[in-house]
Image (cartoon, coloured by chain):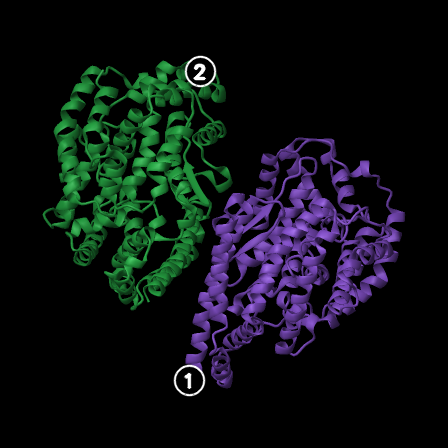
Chain colours: A purple, B green
Amino acid sequence: MSSSAYKTIESRFSEISLMGEIMEALSWDQEVYMAEGSVESRAAQLAWLSGRAHELLTRPDWEDLLGEADAHSDSLTHWQQANLREARREWIHAAALPGKLVEALTLATSRGEVAWRNARNEDDFSIFVPHLKKILELTRETAVLKADALDTTPYNALVDQFQPGLTTHTIDLVFDSLKDFLPGFLIEVQHAQNISKDDVAFKKSYSGRKQEELSLRIMDIMGFDFKRGRLDISAHPFTTGHPLDTRITTAYREHDPLFALTATIHETGHALYELNRPLDWRLQPVGYARGMVVHEAMSLFMEKMVALTPEFIQFITPVMQKVFGNFAELSFEHLYQVTRQVRPGYIRIEADEVTYPLHVILRYELELLLLDDKLKVEDIPEAWNDRMNEYLGIRPPGNAKGCLQDIHWAHGAFGYFPCYTLGAVMASQLFADLNEVYSTTSVDIQQGRFTGIVDWLKERIYDRASLLPFDDLVHAVSGQSISTEPFIKHLRERYAV
Amino acid sequence: MSSSAYKTIESRFSEISLMGEIMEALSWDQEVYMAEGSVESRAAQLAWLSGRAHELLTRPDWEDLLGEADAHSDSLTHWQQANLREARREWIHAAALPGKLVEALTLATSRGEVAWRNARNEDDFSIFVPHLKKILELTRETAVLKADALDTTPYNALVDQFQPGLTTHTIDLVFDSLKDFLPGFLIEVQHAQNISKDDVAFKKSYSGRKQEELSLRIMDIMGFDFKRGRLDISAHPFTTGHPLDTRITTAYREHDPLFALTATIHETGHALYELNRPLDWRLQPVGYARGMVVHEAMSLFMEKMVALTPEFIQFITPVMQKVFGNFAELSFEHLYQVTRQVRPGYIRIEADEVTYPLHVILRYELELLLLDDKLKVEDIPEAWNDRMNEYLGIRPPGNAKGCLQDIHWAHGAFGYFPCYTLGAVMASQLFADLNEVYSTTSVDIQQGRFTGIVDWLKERIYDRASLLPFDDLVHAVSGQSISTEPFIKHLRERYAV
């Protein structure tokens, strides 16, 4: 019977999701508190869990179960049908790969990460070359197998792992438009701005304790529920969790109070998505977050669209003065100037809104060439530096600040980079809609009232989880496809002074 | 083939132990960092893991596997034979109970813990009565089934869960001897001591940060490896872990720097045992710690036998002065006086070395009566208070400070209490041996040198893990059975002034 097949699918996913939650909790601990010498045992624990989850998701009877459930899908509710669609997608991704390939990729990336770290520390790309070759070879194999199973292109199959439903068709539309606009706009902004490095520096010392106080305060203001989560410190800020337990991390830089503040706001944007996914759907695929583009849209919506407005800076200025002291460098004028700064730099994660997409486009273009075997691994540094020069007008002084800066390829995460910029584009679409619907948004922001904004996101994004496919969700929330128009308009308004 | 049956047993235990490690990591997080609203998801995660572990340990083919391995045990090494013996014991405990009983007990104790907390907060035993009745009934059932499987008495079967091989025969020998000696000795000491509450109070304020500094310092001095573990804070100090990841917690009381110090030393005693179990045996039953008596012996050895010596106080006095400041109340004389104080009190966990065993004996006697149905749950308060009066000469002002103070019965942990005092007795046997073998021990302690002491424990206890049964281990390390003689001698020497 269909209902029994469908019920079995639901019950298996409850178990698979529970294993996922456990893996997230253990990984969080590894990043935040675990001692370095415990790596071996933690790796064994995680390997055991992911092995069990993979085993359950690739049992030989899945195809029959899904087929049976599909055949009787008219007896399923709309929600169940969506859940079945997402369950099938999860199964396709898992079942497409033979166990040996999964193991080989796990091994290659865990060795690759070590090599990448060494290569970056030594600024010696050659250390990473043989590892990246191996990872690339296995990733290509993965892409081909998944492409076949998903009936799409290999690169789309990789992207689908991170943002289901996103394809190079959409990515190219967005990136072509941004490549047309950004380089010229960047020169324009740089000419208009006349900010020296000294103008945007902080000279006071900001203690971790006080920065933490500010971080906790802004999380509270944004509506983070501390009964179901917490804030900690890690080398790279991140968010992990689910509606009952979501944790973010931040990092404190002594001479830059804005680093932690913006990181915390960014991660809280992710966290609000996780915390507000429908509780009852938590362990079913339809209840998962809709993908990494949407997740990045949620974090960038808070970090860039909201927190870089003059209204937010007006709001946060006295809050910062109260926490840290009434320093001149914490004046509205100075904070505003610092946050307005546009400056080409080598490092993606330190880039401003204008230059960030160019970092991403560069990586996307190289990924495609690498997967198509049109660029050799050995030739990455030159290709990287040439493009940096072409898009941003600067040439990295070494590979540590160039093609070795990101961990993604060492992790085999080809296809991930586009999510950042698609997320930024989606965030600006959402923010434009919000301002159209609620004329009071800027007043809300100026007064530090996030309830209306969060409720609006809840209704449009959080509450829906994975009920709609990606394209449909974008349409449902903004009445159109992904479009760079609001993003470009936003950049013009904010930076073309 | 025996070797194949034995190999299967080993491989299953690797998996079971890994699940145990994961459960420990999740439970640690729950006690230390998890937000209160995440309880439901964590409970589901832990239930799933313990379900899988129980399932694997109670597969129907275990009896055949163990039988086959036993039949060919002459082809096994001595180590493998010991591992097989411990594996069988683990299986017997798991397989003795039907799944329904395990579930019923889990449910009753998780509800019981909530009720116990309320009852204690309200100082109202009646809230706890129906829960404790249910827990007791299910524990009795458990005890009878395990007694049958282990061929022993029901109470021994319960004790065996915590300290394999320990029986009421040994417990009674020890407790009878202590009941003979302690009440009279207590009166003697109290007459001799003339310490007012004011004499042993601290008046300065001790910040958590500085207390943490002291805790980390003493852990380091004792040989705790921070590359494989950490220190955190929790309501009740505890230790959890294994050779690759062992974590302890402590608690800071503003006006009592000795509370955290002794708690940290106690937990470090546990931690050194876990960290020093043979790494390669980590996931096999023969590699587990030998039981809770031995574990308590390891912690009390450090906390009571070593850290309450005048030599240790001489060593720690200047360390404390350096961390906190040169306060008069941190003089050797004052610290010595505080640690020498013997005073009957209501609370077990705050009791001194002389009165502590009487708290334990009281609980042991009531447990036996309860399990034999010779004492009704409703009558516990009266029985408790009468015995407190008889053994310690005081009567609790309410049940919160009487029979509601401990969580053990709410957890269904009948049979655990004796481990504390047997551990104290074993610790004094070990310390007497150490002093006989190494005449330099007191000089080592006075100079804060723990290497010799830890190496000695490593050779005798840590390295052996569960290679020997409990009685054999006691014999091997001290040349005799558990005996109260060294303990009584120790109390006389330390307190009869």
Left or right of A54? Residue A352 is right
In x, y percent, where is residue A400?
A: 74, 48
Kindly identify which numbered label has been placed on residue A418. none
Q: Is residue B181 visible?
A: yes
Judged from the image, the secondary structure of the residue bearing numbered disc 1 is loop
Please provide percent x and percent y for residue A89: 57, 73
Q: Which mark is residue B327?
A: 2
Q: Which residue is mark 1?
A: A1
The image shows residue B317, relative to residue B101, as above or below, that is above
Q: What chain does badge 1 belong to? A: A
Task: Provide residue A160's location: percent of width, then percent of height.
Answer: 64, 69
Residue A245 visible within the image:
no
Q: Give the CA distance from mark 1 to mark 2.
A: 79 Å
Please state which amino acid type lies under the numbered disc 2.
Phe
User: Looking at the image, which residue is at 18% across and 16% down?
Assistant: B191
CB within 8 Å, label 1 to label 2: no
